[in-house]
Amino acid sequence: MPKNKNEKRPGRKIADNKVVSIWKCPECGHEAVIPPTFYEEAGSPMCSVNESKCNGQDMEYVETRILK
């Protein structure tokens, strides 16, 4: 990241509503589509689909996608 605001930032800006991250539970395989605003509010996603098996297991990052 640039050290001062006069340095150019790499890449191009993309609106938060056009970006999602895909996360997957390593226990049950459930995938979640997470918007960037999620992390500020809740941190890393945890699985709650199969409580008896996953019991709040941290999900693993899979990929980031840009929506059309």
Image: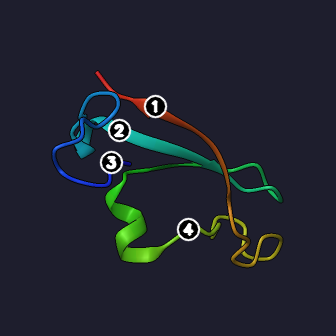
* Residue 51 placement (x, y as % from top left): 72, 75
Q: Is residue 7 left or right of residue 51?
A: left
Residue at 72% from the left image edge and 56% from the top image edge: 25
Contact? badges 2 and 4 (CB < 8 Å): no
> Of callouts 4 and 3, which one flags the residue occurring earlier in the amino acid sequence?
3
Q: What is the spatial separation of the Cα atoms under label 2 and label 4, in whole angstroms?
A: 16 Å
* Residue 38 placement (x, y as % from top left): 38, 64
Q: Residues within 10 Å of mark 3 (few under 14, many from 20)?
A: few
As drawn, the label of residue 65 is 1
Camera-nearest label, 1 or 3: 3
Q: How many marks?
A: 4
Q: What is the spatial separation of the Cα atoms under label 1 and label 4, in whole angstroms?
A: 17 Å
Contact? badges 1 and 2 (CB < 8 Å): yes
Instruction: Identify which residue, 52 or 64, lies in the foreground.
Output: 64
Residue at 42% from the left image edge and 66% from the top image edge: 39
As drawn, the label of residue 2 is 3
Say what amino acid the circle numbered 4 marks. Answer: Ser
> Of callouts 1 and 3, which one flags the residue occurring earlier in the amino acid sequence?
3
As drawn, the label of residue 44 is 4
Kindly state the secondary structure of the residue where label 3 is placed: loop
> Of callouts 2 and 3, which one flags the residue occurring earlier in the amino acid sequence?
3
Q: Is residue 1 left or right of residue 62?
A: left
Say what amino acid the circle numbered 2 marks. Answer: Val
Query: Where 50 sits versus 19, above or below?
Result: below
Circle 2 is placed at which residue position? 19
Instruction: Identify which residue, 7 or 20, lies in the foreground.
Output: 7
